[in-house]
């Protein structure tokens, strides 16, 4: 088995609020992007409700909701605050998408 095949998947952390309509829209956009490009297994997806885990939100420096964070090798590789649609999410995730 090669080192590339054994490399762990990057984490995609979706910081959101269950009370926010915009967060629900962005979650739908994210699902569309991952399904359209057949990349639903590219990331290990973590949904974090900011109200339930304020400690994680603080640790990641989350100021705006929703926010997407890509984590590789226990380090933040990229962060996108308040994405506005599928194109923006797809562009943000493009380094990891096929």
Image (tube, rainbow, N blue to C red):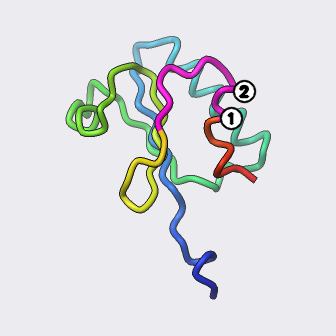
Farthest residue in the bottom direction? Answer: 1
Q: Is mark 1 on a helix, strand or loop?
A: helix
Q: What element carries label 2?
A: helix
* Disc 1/disc 2 C-alpha distance (Å): 6 Å
Q: How many marks?
A: 2
Above or below: residue 46 compared with residue 32: below
Above or below: residue 28 compared with residue 20: below
Disc 1 marks which residue?
91
> How far from the left and from the top, in percent, is residue 95?
65, 49
Q: How packed is label 1: few (under 14 Cα within 10 Å), some, or many (20 or more)?
A: few
Q: How packed is label 2: few (under 14 Cα within 10 Å), some, or many (20 or more)?
A: few
Residue 90: say if magenta. Answer: yes
Query: In the rendered view, does 90 fall on the left or right side of 46?
Result: right
Q: Residue shown at 66%/20% (left/top)?
A: 85
Disc 2 marks which residue?
87
Work out whether residue 19 or residue 1 is closer to the camera in this orientation and state it: 1
Looking at the rendering, the stretch of residues picked out in magenta corresponds to 79-91
């Amino acid at each position: 088995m090669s080192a590339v095949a054994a490399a762990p998947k990057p984490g995609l952390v979706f910081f959101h609020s269950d009370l926010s309509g915009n967060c629900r829209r962005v979650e739908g956009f994210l699902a569309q992007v991952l399904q359209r490009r057949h990349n639903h297994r590219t990331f290990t997806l973590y949904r974090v409700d900011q109200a339930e885990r304020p400690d994680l939100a603080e640790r990641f420096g989350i100021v705006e909701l929703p926010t997407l964070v890509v984590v590789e090798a226990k380090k933040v590789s990229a962060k996108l605050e308040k994405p506005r649609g599928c194109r923006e999410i797809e562009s943000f995730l493009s380094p990891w998408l096929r």
